[in-house]
Amino acid sequence: MASFHDFAVVCQALGQTNSRLQIAELAGEFLVSLDIDEAAIAARLMVGRALEQGVEKRTQISGRAVWRIVTEIVGGDDRGEDIFAAAADFGEAIEILLRSRNPDPEPTLTILEIGRRIGEIAEIEGRNSRGRKLAVLRDLFAQANALEGKYLAKILIGEMRHGMSEGLMLEAIARMAARPVAEIRRAHMLEGDLGRLVRNLRTPGSTATAATNDALGDEAATPRAAQPAAPAALPQNKPLRPMLAAPVANMAEAFRVLDGDLALEHKLDGARVQIHRDGGSVRIFSRRLNEVTASLPEVVEAMANLPARHAIFDGEVIAIDQSGRPLAFQEVMRRFGRRRDIDRLRIEQPIRLFLFDLMGLEGQLLIDMPYAERYAALNGIAEAAGFRLAERIIPTSTIEADQFYAHATAAGFEGVMAKGLTSPYTPGARGRGWLKIKTARTLDLVIVAADWGYGRRHGWLSNYHLAARDDRAGSLVEVGKTFKGLTDADFQEMTERLLTLKIEESRGTVHVRPEVVVEVAYSDIQRSPRYAGGMALRFARIVGVRSDKSPDDADTIANVAAAFDRQMVKPSPAE
């Protein structure tokens, strides 16, 4: 069995190269050396994912808990400030602390054991669950040597910082499987989880491999430049990652990007849902691929009258007031994940379902079919059942499009979606087939640290450090701070949540595990040497906590740069 120490050595080597090609080669060669179960676990862990994508349970282990346990293991240490000052990140601080043991333990942990024990931590619930979780964690760190402890800590806080992004891992998996990268990316669109993808590719003759081959096509060894992909079989109750939209400034830009061949829909400020109907069974999955069926009985009931017996629908659930006008995103999130008092909540906070795409129908995936054809099929199903779809037009001019936009915002919607009529459905990808035009300038960013407040905000973490994703580096890049937009109750709730994610604290700043995604409005973007991304948001304020999104769904530094480029007026650089 492969040792976890070998995994840590490879991760260390990845962090010492800036070459994307070498990173993919190192990781691919390592995956080839492992058996199927080990490779599936290693692929997830290497990008900082402790658990399978779409698993509802969480480890609920904070950086603060890891530090406390390791300090106990080494017999106490009062050098915390000095260690964090000398370390590049939290993982390295744990490594320094563990090296104070003498001697450093011999490697005994295996990749399989790490995967199994992390899964065990996530499964622990009920009475004294925290104590039992920490007991398992303490046992793991007691066995780990310094290098293993470094990467175990990094995995648990979800911040590897060694250049291995999800995109590069797909290149590594392509090397492992000797398959073209484009086909591996497509298979990942359909599978969603890196570990399951590796297992499918490494299991000869299994039904999973057959399904993956259906998705990839028969010509697996050579790219198929001009041929459309063969239709893939409809997955049974396995969610696909949702297609994402890229932001544009206005209707004129949307017409230019989509060559005037587009449809417009109201942009809904709600929670994305993917609905799988399999005969008499209906299952609902969230944007993060977690099952939320029990929380939304109205949606299950709405599906009962649809003529399609086997289908996958993409849609959005919004909260509405008594007059039927849409409410803010935070209102609908009161319903997600709730299993109790659903009858009461149905009355207190009614919701409305809008469908806008059809991903699969009667045994076949439709993701390679043009959007116009998918929508026609969806519309036929909806009309037969008297079901309501999102309001939509096919504009013939930017004037007509601007009028539709004005109508949408006046009705309380946050903007408009523009969809290319010939575009395929690309799960998990933010391509140029779908575009979003919003009234407010907003970005989805990750909170990576927070400062203790003063004055009225004393005792709260209330100045939040905001970061965008850097896909190339596989890390998060700060682009600003804000303490605006939250109420006192919000500050208190956010403080409690961030303290559970605490990694370290220095000079009044608490650094946290990057899990909380917030929607941030801003006036404009300016160049700034203060931040690693070279840009900063001006007059930023938090307009909502996006609990439906993970850090992987946050905007990228490339999105921030594109928004800066679209600005007609470029503010002077901040000093």
Image (cartoon, rainbow, N blue to C red):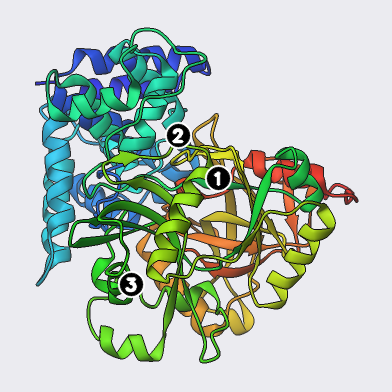
> What x and y, as percent, mark residue 205?
12, 20
Relative horizontal placement of residue 61, taking residue 367 as reference (left or right): left
Cα gap from disc 2 to disc 3, whole angstroms: 27 Å
Relative depth, front residue between 47 and 298 = 298
**Which of labels 3 and 1 is toward the front?**
1
Q: Name the secondary structure under disc 1.
A: helix
Name the residue tied to disc 3: 302
Label 3 packing within 10 angstroms: few (<14), some (14-19), many (20+): few
> What x and y, as percent, mark residue 23?
43, 17
Disc on res. 368:
2
Mark 1 and mark 2 residues within 8 Å of each other at the beta carbon: no
- Amino acid tagged 3: Ala
Name the residue tied to disc 1: 372
> What x and y, as percent, mark residue 253?
78, 45
Work out whether residue 288 can be spotted: no
Q: Name the secondary structure under disc 3.
A: helix
What residue is rendered at 27% in x and 87% in y? 343
Cα gap from disc 3 to disc 1, whole angstroms: 24 Å
Relative depth, front residue between 142 and 117 = 117
Work out whether residue 401 can be spotted: yes
The tag earlier along the polypeptide, 2 or 3, is: 3
> What x and y, as percent, mark residue 341?
25, 86
**Which of labels 1 and 2 is toward the front?**
1
- Amino acid tagged 2: Asp
Label 2 packing within 10 angstroms: few (<14), some (14-19), many (20+): some
Mark 3 and mark 1 residues within 8 Å of each other at the beta carbon: no
Residue placed farthest to the front in the image?
Answer: 384
